[in-house]
Image (cartoon, helix red, strand yellow):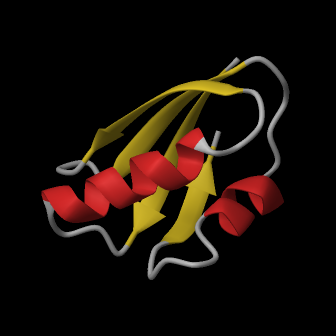
Amino acid sequence: MNYHVKVEGMSCNGCANSVKAAFSNIEGVSQVDVDLVEKEATLAASKELTKQQLEDALADTSYTVESFK
């Protein structure tokens, strides 16, 4: 399953790397690509993810999930 997640608060490559690391720690996620310009992360997962799981992954950061599909 692929997910596209709009992430609020990213402004630099360091931000993108932090978001990538946070989403990579979610169980079942096998790949994360972050597009800083679009402020979007694309996740490949072996199971269904919820918005809550995505928000929890970013809980210790200054970034927030704006939307996902």
Residue at the image position 55 percent from the left and 31 percent from the top: 43
Q: Quadrant of the C terminus?
A: top right
Q: Is residue 60 left or right of residue 34?
A: right
Relative to residue 42, is residue 20 depicted above or below? below
Where residue 50 sits: x, y (%)?
82, 48
Where residue 57 sits: x, y (%)?
65, 61
Residue at the image position 17 percent from the left and 50 percent from the top: 37
| Count of numbered marks | 0
Where residue 60 sits: x, y (%)?
58, 78
Q: Is residue 50 left or right of residue 43?
A: right
Where residue 36 sits: x, y (%)?
22, 51
Relative to residue 37, is residue 60 depicted above or below? below
Relative to residue 52, is residue 62 depicted above or below? below
Q: Is residue 55 left or right of residue 43?
A: right
Quadrant of the rendered image containing residue 14: bottom left
Residue at the image position 35 percent from the left and 75 percent from the top: 9
Q: Quadrant of the N terminus?
A: top right
Front residue of 1/17: it is 17
Residue at the image position 78 percent from the left and 55 percent from the top: 53
